[in-house]
Image: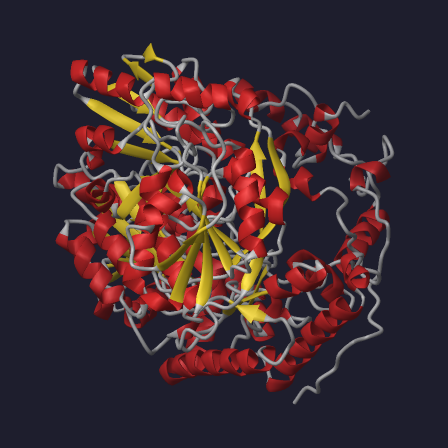
Amino acid sequence: MKKIGLIVNPVAGIGGKVGLKGSDGIDTQRRARELGAVPESDRKAELALRKLHESLEDADSAEIYTWPGAMGGDIAKGFPFRTHVIGELGEGGTTASDTMDAAVALKAVGVDLILFAGGDGTARNILDAVGDGVPVLGIPAGCKIHSAVYAVNPRSAGELVASFVEGRVRDTRESEVMDIDEELFREDRVDAKLYGYLRVPNAGQKVQNLKSGRGYSESGSIEFLSRCVADSLEDDTLYIVGGGSTTKRIMGAVGLPDTLLGIDLFRNRKIVKNDAAERDILGALGEYPKAKIIVTVIGGQGYLFGRGNQQISAEVIKRVGRDNIIIAASKDKMNSLFGQPLYVDTGDDEVNASLTGYHKILVGYDDYVVFKVAC
Amino acid sequence: MAKTKVRKNFHQARWDEPIIYDLSTPGLRGIIPPEADAEISAAYSGVMSKLPAEVKRKSSIDLPEVDQKHVLQHWLHLSQETMGSNISNDISEGTCTMKYNPRVNETIIADPGFAELHPDQDPDTVQGMLEIFYKFENMLKEVSGMDYVSLQPGGGNHAVYTAASIVRAYHAARGEAEQRDTVITTIFSHPCDAAAPATAGYKIVTVYPDERGVPDIEAIRAAADEHTAAIFMTNPEDIGIYNPYADQIVDIIHGVGGLCFYDQANANAFLGVARAREAGFDMCHFNVHKTFGTPHGSSGPATGALCVRDYLAKYLPVPVTQFDGQKYWLDYDRPESLGKIREYLGVASVVLKAYAWTMMMGDEGLRECAEISVINNNYMQKLMAEIPKMDEAFKGNGIVRQEQIRYSFGKLTEKTGVGSDDANRRMLDYGIPWFWSSHHPWVIPEPMTLEPCETYTKEDIEEYVEVVKAVVGEALKDPDLVKNAPYNSAIHKRKNEQNLDDPKKWALTWKVFKKKFKVD
């Protein structure tokens, strides 16, 4: 039997869909709630536990240790695992110190692995609290997923923990904890730092690779693909452009201002809305139903949707349609992903499934590669 | 039989040779012809005035002014600073099919009966050469199973570009040129299979392999649609793995109305064994200068033989060599032809040498060439597998390799930091020529592609492996020794590799160098 620690950061990812590009700090979380954001980390943790339960031959082979209420206790009690809720929540909303207190306490009771739902901020807190003293695995639930400690999606996290519990995966590997400065991020500047290493179960594709930093030698490839997109624009079509340095260059080729890590909308070469939230996009689609989405492949992870562009929600994708998605990435980026599929994690199984299969990725002027998309 | 010899004390000449322009002395001449007789001068002194103005230079040509002795000395020094093909262990040049080129064929093309022919001669006076073109075309028809052959293209890429032009002509004739704007290829096909159709105006869709290293047939199926003009694919691919789905891929592409071009530059694996026709392809090409025994690798001119099925023959470039039972003649009256793609018929010296080589080999010899190439490669693979940290593309996938293999120093790099370029420089210190790493992009980490063709002996292969083993051993013991190599070669370690990727720092000629960097 293995002891599994569970920490849910209830506010992780709350800023994503409303375009705040992060959830660090109480002020940001308050602002996100004012904009109508609903936390998603509890649902993702629940998905992971469900998959864990489905995957285990014997539910008694895992014992859950967790923190009260929204930090894990509420979710764990919905499953037939033997569950121990330890510690106490402070007054008011949860903060980083709650995550750190929980991690220290879970280590103290001797858990074999800490499963946490959160983003890079949560990973940093756990690193600060327990270092590499206990293996961890992240359920991707934050806005920022630059670290390499997360499973590909909540289901993969559940499967991987089951493999760990049943001894099919024994090795661990040191994986990077990275984070970016949210304040600079909101000013369109990426300042990614390596904060340290956590140990994660070593199971190949079930754990995300480190998201790579800014491109440099890829410049020519991106220049060509940008010109190709700019030369192929269709009239009276709403273009929903995802974040990233590649899409920024595309916007430059079109001659329009861009929000580096936000979503921009344009039509007939004129901006409809910069830095759009999900509701802005849905509103624009109401007015201009003929639309295309332009996204890039996110770093070493190979994500198309669900990482850093949550504003392009499942509903948005459903309304635009699979055939109207333009995926553009440099040749170097695609070669770095050789051997693995691209991923989507929109939070909607039906939409995820509709996006699977083979897609053409634009890597130059009239130059494409074919990659498989999985969810 | 040659003996294995690992040359630990190899030392190459290093002349620190200046660029020939730096040897120039104003006014110096290699040959000073005598003054013409007065009578001759009087008759021809005005000849320059008869030239049209547009062909006259406005300024004198900037040539180095060097006497004969120093020109000869300069080129001899340069030649001593190369590793030389045919005199070294050229297993290094994987994908290049570096086989021994029989010297006797050089004697044949030096014969005045051939060397003094001129391509502008009346066909009636060059019947022998036309016969060789015609008969060599027939040999390639037999080898490929195709119906017609053009020997005009001046190299493999040229043949592939010609094929792309035929694809366009074919679809244009069917009224589908605009609709069919895409060519599919695979990442381990030769880069020209993407580049040549792109140059011909096509969009390119590149398919990656599955986990076994074989092109993902489902990805090809997904990519093929009503916009597909053709697929251009190499087989065996450049990693040495034969694509067993070639005929199924042909069915997919034909099913959507596209054409299928088979890049057979790696034909050394299957001469006399498998043919493009039986796999269903519409066109294929051979690199005559590689597979058919004539020199290349900067030591000889090239010929790309383009082979097509009968329904595409009308698009072949003109002229086409014909035989009416009595004599050979050049057919220019082909209204749907692409026209001329270069001067005259092609590179006659390559065709003559290749004809001689093929006649010498015979049909059984061609098959034996393929069999020995594959056996050599598989023997080498077994030896290479014994070298610590040596890896290969898709190792252990259960597929027998063909005539070459893309090896990988990736594991060695992880352990020691010594990569492909480092190993390459160090191997020069053992007298082994620079090996071919990979076409770009480097999908396989720290690659090395080796091709032990049929003319290498068992000892040649063992010698090569011993050198790789020695260099890997050095890397594991003293990585800096390998990283700082070479020590005994004419070349040196480049200080700033990234400069090679920066067009702003390129100067392909001395004149450009002087102009670009304002050198006096």
Task: Give the x, y percent position of residue B66.
Answer: 83, 40
Please name the colour scheme applied to the rendered image: secondary structure
On the question of residue B340 being in view, the answer is no
Query: As drawn, is B489 to the left or to the right of B286?
Result: right
**Nearer to the camera, B400 or A330:** A330
Q: Residue drawn 39% across and 81% down?
A: B367
Q: Quadrant of residue A29?
A: top left
Q: Is residue A16 above or below residue B351?
A: above
Quadrant that contains the N terminus of chain B: bottom right
Look at 61% across and 24% down and name the residue there.
B48
A77 sits to left or right of B18: left
Q: Which residue is drawn at 78% across and 76% down?
A: B7
User: Is residue A76 depicted above or below A316 in this figure?
Assistant: below
Q: Residue at x 66, y 60 (%)?
A: B413
Q: In which quarter of the image is the C terminus of chain B?
A: top right
Apparent side of residue B159 relative to residue A95 in the rendered image (left or right): left
**Relative image position of residue B3 (x, y in whole percent):** 71, 87
In this view, the residue in front, A257 or B1, is A257
In the displayed structure, B236 sits above or below A175; it is below
